[in-house]
Amino acid sequence: MTDPQAEIQLLRRQMQSLMDEARLNEKKWRRFEQFEKQLIATRSLPELIRVILEDYKTACETDAVTLVLCDPEREIRRILERSQQGSAEVPGLVLMEKLDAHHTKPAPYLGPFDAEMERAIFDPWPTGCQSMILLPLMRQDELIGSLNMASSTAERFTADSSTDFIERLANIFSICLENSLNHERLKLVGLTDPLTGIYNRRYLETRCQEEAAHVRRYRSPLSCMFLDIDKFKRINDSFGHNIGDKILCSVTAQIKSQLRSNDVLARYGGEEFVVLLPQTGIRGACDIAERIRRTVAEQAFQIGREDELKVTISIGVAQAPVDADGDERTVAHQLLAAADEALYLAKESGRNKVVSDHNRPASLVAKRSLISFLGFNSA
Ligand SMILES: Nc1nc2c(ncn2[C@@H]2O[C@H](COP(=O)(O)OP(=O)(O)OP(=O)(O)O)[C@@H](O)[C@H]2O)c(=O)[nH]1
């Protein structure tokens, strides 16, 4: 016969333990709910990645969180580069052009931490980890990456741990990732030129103000180039607009080939391009401009089977004064105007030239001033 008192005690303990578990689950649920709201509220891809790698790591009190994303077209890389001054580096983010089946599995993995096997997905490398979880990120039945966590406690992630909350979170993250990629794509359509694929004037003007603000804040040099294809009308008239378009794309590629990843190239209009060169003074900018001028002039464009066409460009270069007065709008406007003015002088002095606002031919400056004073249009 059992002792009724002992039985009651046992039932009480069981009840207490169930209530403790329920309280813990409720706390966990609230934490996840809070975190889901935070994910959904993110407004850009870099912010979404930061929330999962930093805020989530803090919230779930684990030793390491990393994110592997499949980026076959290097689209995510380019979005990050655009928003982080040319660098796609984010601690904890691993971009793979092709997912490695060894590290990304279609079902969650929970268990012991395998240091050798996981070197590729835990970057930076966490020391002293005992257990880990790899959660596949799926979108429309396709594996797009994995969310990975490691802990210094062996019991934190074991094969029999419940994964309901975290799998739900991984699903929400995958949806947010798709949404923010679509948002970035839409944004890009409005900011790029459909023919050449480079930025358009709208983007350039906004970016120029951002860079001008940087100059004012950090006193870092910023230069700008205006580039214009010489006698382009003649090319269109002689060979047709289709060939003209091909030349525009080809010149774009030639200019791009001479730039660094954090330089900003935009089509300003027609056959006119602008390059912003952050962290670059006038001498450096003139060297790059000269390299571009030479590269384009040396290139022969193939037209049809036999004909070849040589194209030249003129370039005006200017640097924003590091101690400029006025707000960033004014500084940006003055910088673009100074480079445009230098381009005018390059055209006037014979084309296929680089002119900077530091080496302007004095006679042409006087002529330009007279033209503006008389109110004529300077064609
Ligand atoms: N094919 C093509 N031509 C364009 C495009 N946008 C502008 N153009 C042409 O670019 C030419 C620009 O001519 P102009 O402004 O007279 O200048 P230019 O002939 O290059 O002479 P300079 O600049 O003085 O050396 C015009 O014929 C425009 O029609 C485009 O998207 N495609």
Image (spheres, grey):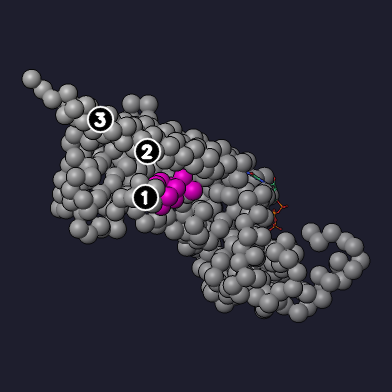
Disc 2 marks which amino acid? Lys
Along the line of sight, the residue nearer the viewer: 226 or 16: 16
- Tell me the quarter of the picture where residue 365 sits: bottom right
Relative to 276, residue 24 above or below: above
Label 2 residue SS:
helix
Q: Tell me the residue at 39%/48% (across/down).
A: 59
Using a 10 Å C-alpha cutoff, classify the residue at mark 1 as few (fewer than 14 neighbours), some (14 to 19) or many (20 or more): some
Q: Nearer the viewer, mark 2 or mark 1?
A: 2
Relative to 128, residue 358 above or below: below
Question: Are circles 2 and 3 on residues that touch, CB within 8 Å?
Answer: no
Label 3 residue SS:
helix
Can you see residue 114? Answer: yes
Separation of marks 3 and 1 at Cα, in angstroms: 36 Å
Q: Which mark is residue 12?
A: 3
Separation of marks 2 and 1 at Cα, in angstroms: 14 Å
Q: Which mark is residue 28?
A: 2
Disc 1 marks which amino acid? Lys
Q: Nearer the viewer, mark 2 or mark 3?
A: 3
Question: Are circles 3 and 1 on residues that touch, CB within 8 Å?
Answer: no
Q: Tell me the residue at 78%/78% (across/down).
A: 363
Disc 3 marks which amino acid? Arg
Say which label, 2 or 3, has the lower sequence index.
Answer: 3
Q: Tag count in the figure?
A: 3
Q: Nearer the viewer, mark 3 or mark 1?
A: 3
Q: Tell me the residue at 71%/74% (across/down).
A: 324
- Quadrant in the picture for the N terminus: top left
